[in-house]
Image: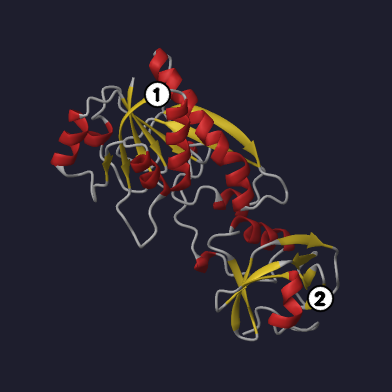
Amino acid sequence: MKLIVHGQQAFGKSVLEALLERGEEVCAVYCAPDSGSRTDPLKAYAQEQGLPLFQPKTYKDESVVAQMKDLGADLCVMAYVTLMVPESALNAPRLGSIQYHPSLLPLHKGPSSINWPIIFGETKTGLSIFWPDDGLDTGPILLQKDVAIAPDDTLGSLYFNHLFPMGVASMCEAVDLVREGTAPCIEQDPSGGTYEGWCRAEDVKIDWHQPVDSVYNMIRGANPQPGAWTTLSGQKLTVLDSTRAEVIEATPGTVTSIDETGMTIAGDGGSILISRVKTESGAKLSAADFPGQLTVSVGDLLGAS
């Protein structure tokens, strides 16, 4: 079965690697147009393997669709695609296209589907391989896998420890099902779904007066991107690594202690121990750096206007 791999970044590269290691015939690779000076990992690997590489700026161009049809592919495997791809391009391969999405569709459609379940305090998410259509993450489901969200999981840990490797394996499993002619095509229930947009910095400004569980979930769900943030002496301070700490009676946002493990901040119903931050200048500091590089004292109030 001839495959097109369409994707970008480390996930796209890993899917391509896995398919080639299995002996799959990949007739072409499509990836996002160049942006900045850093070469996309999928592009670099495709070039290393000598595979035909295409980077169209749009898939609405009839010549792009014609080019895809001329490849004679049986299936397009979409591994982290952010450009909108119309059905004319999706259906260019003989058997159509399949796509990875890191949530249990129809829940958490949209571009930040790993952030939001953590921020909302959910304890389960997962991944879906589906048959994309002209909608946004609305196509029929091929397969799904559940993933537990642990109490201290972050965006980073959930993705790199679970959704990333499981996603690569699931894409290979889906290719097998399509080849065997047994791939499900289960319509999504539009009444039971949710959609959230990009999780941006303005969405994750910390309000220390909110319940401590909500604050901690926001910090976890935004770590490392876009980074939940507060202010210290009028300067933006992005909170990266943190853990829950014991209840300390103090005004929410107050720095109650500073030691080699980090600084503890009082909240509503508990405290949060912050062990890694990013300053407004972009410097990332661990707990050991706080005394010499972060101007903070016990009694300071984070988030004060």
Is residue 138 something one can see in this rendering? no
Question: What is the x, y in percent for residue 23?
Answer: 42, 23
Determine the image quadrant of residue 184. Answer: top left
Residue mark closest to the camera, 2 vs 1: 1
In the rendered structure, the answer to whether residue 278 lies left or right of residue 188 reads right
Q: Which residue is mark 2?
A: 258
Residue 159, above or below 253: above
Question: What is the x, y in percent for residue 245?
Answer: 82, 62
First along the sequence among labels 2 and 1: 1
Determine the image quadrant of residue 69. Answer: top left
The one of 117 and 76 positioned closer to us in this rendering? 76
Residue at horizontal 65 percent and vertical 86 percent from the top: 233
Residue 181, above or below 81: above
Q: Quadrant of the C terminus?
A: bottom right
Q: Which residue is mark 1?
A: 24
In the rendered structure, the answer to whether residue 288 lies left or right of residue 135 reads right
Residue at horizontal 39 percent and vertical 24 percent from the top: 24
Is residue 221 something one can see in this rendering? yes
Q: Quadrant of the N terminus?
A: top left
Question: What is the x, y in percent for residue 288?
Answer: 76, 72
The one of 291 and 251 positioned closer to us in this rendering? 291
Badge 2 density bin: few <14, some 14–19, many ≥20, Cα 10 Å: some
